[in-house]
Image (tube, helix red, strand yellow):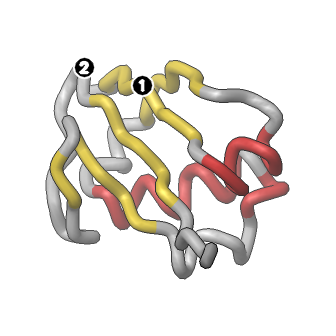
Amino acid sequence: MNRTVEILYFAGVRDIVGLPSERLTLPAAVVTVGDLVGHLEQVRPELSGRLGSVRFAVNETFAAAQDALAEGDVVALIPPVSGG
């Protein structure tokens, strides 16, 4: 069953993608946050190899790779922040 989720891109990830957000319909095989990483690298090749240090949050809660995705979830990609 396909699910549609909203992806929010922050900071450097937003700069790479060129969008603040987008809605994606996920293939049936994409059921977890870990699966989503691979899918994003396919649909957004500019992200390939760049998501290793990015944190994922689902519905405003940090998520682990094994966490399941559901219809209507909001997934934020939050890169490491540096500053001083």
* Disc 2, SS: loop
How many residues crowd mark 2 within 10 Å: few (<14), some (14–19), many (20+)?
few
* Disc 1, SS: strand
Quick check: 35 above or below 82? above
Which label was assigned to residue 64? Answer: none
Q: List x then y, in percent, for residue 82.
A: 61, 75
Query: Left or right of 42: which side holds 10?
Result: left
Along the viewing direction, whichever of 29 and 59 lies nearer the viewer: 59
Q: List x then y, in percent, for residue 24.
A: 51, 25
Q: Residue at x 16, y 50 (%)?
A: 61
Q: List x then y, in percent, for residue 65.
A: 27, 70
Q: Residue at x 55, y 52 (%)?
A: 39
- CB under 8 Å between callouts 2 and 1? yes
Going by the numbered disc 2, the residue's amino acid type is Gly
Q: List x then y, in percent, for residue 73.
A: 25, 29
Along the viewing direction, whichever of 50 and 26 lies nearer the viewer: 50
Quick check: 11 above or below 84? above
The residue under label 1 is 6
How many residues crowd mark 1 within 10 Å: few (<14), some (14–19), many (20+)?
some
Displayed quadrant of residue 43 = top right
Going from the N terminus, do you reach mark 2 or mark 1 first?
1
Going by the numbered disc 1, the residue's amino acid type is Glu
The quarter in which the N terminus is drawn is top left
Q: State how far apart marks 2 and 1 are (Cα).
A: 7 Å
The residue under label 2 is 72
Q: Residue at x 81, y 50 (%)?
A: 16
Displayed quadrant of residue 56 = bottom left
